[in-house]
Image: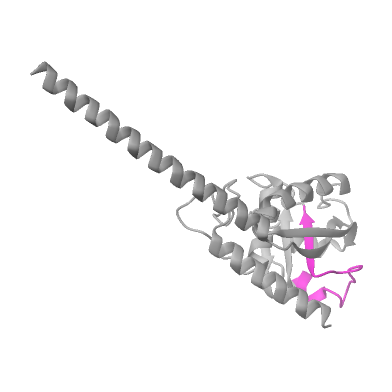
Amino acid sequence: MIKRYKVIFIIRLILLSIGFCIISDFANQFSNASTLEKSDFATIVLPISVYILDDEDGDLSSTRTADQLSDVFEKVNRIWTQAGIKIDVQQISRLVLPSSYLENIAKGNYKPFLNGFNQEFSVPEPSLLDAFYAKRIGGVNGRAIFLLRMFFVTDYPSVHHERVTSHEIGHILGLSHAMYDRGRLMYSGTNGTTLTKDEIEIARQHAVLLLESFSGK
């Protein structure tokens, strides 16, 4: 009886070893395939102009600095490298606006700003993408205006600063919110940073189309 038990035990060990080897081999193949896919990407460079919004009365001026945002975009590029996309900062400048614009943005009302954009006030050297950093933007971390290729980010997000910026860039590049997986960049309200294969393909396609339309102006 004991001998039979030992035989069964040894057989189980052999089967477990075979199974482990198969799983390890599959994991290695998957890892290598992922690495190859990432290294095969031709980098797509997207220019962006960054604006720090200041209130002419001072009460709603952003607390951001150019150095802080330079650091944020360095981290943003670490996130977007998985898609072979580089966000190229053309400039970081401060933009002083009448108090009414910042008051409305703080309430989540972007219409006055959008209506006045390049009409009642000018934005120096806009680029393919335009990013606006404000003290408050209506109780959310960020807000993308897809058709205008611009987004807003609050000074006080509930997640990492680079994650908010990367998430909003994702929306500009055609990505919608992800469901269920909190590790994803497009999941709302977390520090997730991963992109799926489909998301990478969509983002790259949109990036190419944006560059083509921008260069054709």
Residue 62 on the magenta span = no
Camera-nearest residue between 49 and 112: 49
- The residue sitting at 47% across, 45% down in the picture is 27
Residue 33 x %, y %: 55, 53
Camera-nearest residue between 49 and 58: 49
Image position of 30 (left or right of 3)? right
Q: Which residues are magenta?
A: 112-134
| Quarter placement of the N terminus | top left
Residue 108 appears in the picture as rendered: no
- The residue sitting at 50% across, 49% down in the picture is 29
Residue 127 on the magenta span = yes
Camera-nearest residue between 3 and 215: 3
- The residue sitting at 57% across, 63% down in the picture is 199
* Number of callouts: 0
Residue 134 appears in the picture as rendered: yes
Question: Which residue lies most toward the bottom here?
Answer: 216
| Quarter placement of the C terminus | bottom right
Image position of 162 (left or right of 26)? right
Question: Which residue lies most toward the top here?
Answer: 2
Image position of 214 (left or right of 137)? right
Camera-nearest residue between 115 and 150: 150
Residue 36 x %, y %: 61, 54
Residue 135 x %, y %: 76, 51
- The residue sitting at 82% across, 59% down in the picture is 88
- Type of colouring: one colour
Quarter holding residue 111: bottom right
Seen in the picture, residue 148 relative to 27 is either above or below; the reply is below
Residue 120 x %, y %: 88, 75
Image position of 60 (left or right of 83)? right
